[in-house]
Amino acid sequence: MDDRTDTEDRLRREVVRLRRTNEAMRRIMVAVEQGMVAVLITDAQGRIEYVNPRFTELTGYSSTEALGRTPAFLKSGQEPPEFYARLWATISSGETWKGEFRNRKKDGGLFWEAATIAPIRDREGRIVSYVGIKEDITERRQAQQDLCQLNEELEARVRRRTARLEAANAELDAFSYSVSHDLRAPLRGIDGFSAALEEEFGAQLGPEAQHYLQRIRAGTLRMGQLIDDLLRLSRVSRGPLNRQRLDLGALARGLMAELRQQDPSRTLDFEPEEGLWAWGDPGLLRSVLENLLGNAWKYTGKQPAARIELCRADLGDGAAGFQVRDNGAGFDMAYAGKLFTAFQRLHGGHEFEGTGIGLALVRRIVGRHGGLVRAEGAVGQGASFSFSLPGPA
């Protein structure tokens, strides 16, 4: 009885195991039949024994047309023979092959597929069949090709734009040379002859003639200043930025000390906020503060209790912001749009000297650093100039 009971138990366990195996196989077959990837199984010689419905959808060949044939009937002719030789050598040695290649559909259309082909062994380790899992990647490859083409077009545009920029810079260099040398020569001549005329014949000239002569010399001096400022403006847009971490407060104190030396009699309150750290080119940011503080110094010249401040500001662009403000002459906000345009001035030369290039220079420098510039003011109530400087990339 015991032997019979043991046999029955073993049979029951085997039946349960077979049922579970069959259920697992059924689920696998359902997944293969309904899957979104093409599946084919071949024998050890590569003859197709099974294809799923997705294979038919992808290639246009029915299972009847595919069974018994090798996958070679799908070859596109786009891959060299060595490609297939390496594939076959890999799987026949017992390794799995993965790669991408083109095949041809029944209607002649080409398609790209990503394939994984693996050998299947029996209990003795012999390869008895191969299974291939194939995914249609035609759209992905087309997108990659379109992206590569777009990148090539963009690179070509960059090359053309770079060539135009280099040509423009060469023209600008030639223009700067012409301005610096060809225009200065006649100016020096006018100024030199005017000085000689004043020195040798000044006593013989009447008051009106002397006035005209002084205006000629003043005009040549102003023209020389305009040439200098024009050259400075042209140089700002060229050359690499040498970004460093700078203490704007310390830089501002040094510039203010230089201004005080030029006019020791001035009484002015200035103390920058502590910890005004920024990232930027030292020479260019010095020029920014030099122009902003110089303007504030100039336009507070008629204030008995002049005050200039340098502090933090928020321009809403997420970058570190700074502000120079004063209690000087100010300006009408209706004309604020002219402030950063070269050679545009809101105050006459008889009130405050200058060429109108400083704020244009400030905007160009801050723009090269990727920042913003903003101005606010009111007539007789002072002005404030804010600028932002993004941190290192």
Image: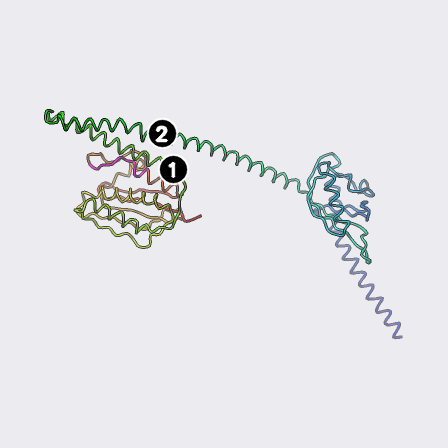
Q: Looking at this view, is 169 or 12 the one in front? A: 169
Dividing the picture into quarters, in which one does residue 138 lie?
top right
Q: Which residues are magenta?
A: 351-360
Question: Within the magenta stretch, is there residue 200?
Answer: no
Q: Amino acid at mark 2?
A: Phe
SS assignment at label 2: helix
Task: Tell which circle, 2 or 1, labels the residue nearer the N-terminal end.
Answer: 2
The quadrant in which the N terminus is found is bottom right
Q: Mark 2 highlights which residue?
A: 175
Q: For mark 2, does the 10 Å Cα neighbourhood hold few (<14), some (14 to 19), or many (20 or more) residues?
A: some
Q: Amino acid at mark 1?
A: Ser
On the rendered structure, is 259 left or right of 285?
left
Up-down relation of residue 162 to residue 11 (above or below): above
Q: Nearer the viewer, mark 2 or mark 1?
A: 2
Please say if the residues under marks 2 and 1 sit with CB atoms less than 8 Å apart.
no
Q: For mark 1, does the 10 Å Cα neighbourhood hold few (<14), some (14 to 19), or many (20 or more) residues?
A: some
SS assignment at label 1: loop
Q: Which mark is residue 169?
A: none
Can residue 189 be spotted in the picture? yes
Can residue 34 be spotted in the picture? no
Residue 76, given in percent of the width and then of the height, sits at 73, 37
Residue 72, given in percent of the width and then of the height, sits at 77, 40
On the rendered structure, is 63 left or right of 331?
right
Residue 195, given in percent of the width and then of the height, sits at 18, 29
Q: Mark 1 highlights which residue?
A: 237
On the rendered structure, is 36 left or right of 187?
right
Residue 118, given in percent of the width and then of the height, sits at 74, 50
Residue shown at 79%/59% (left/top)? Answer: 21
Q: Looking at this view, is 54 or 90 the one in front? A: 90
Magenta segment main secondary structure: loop
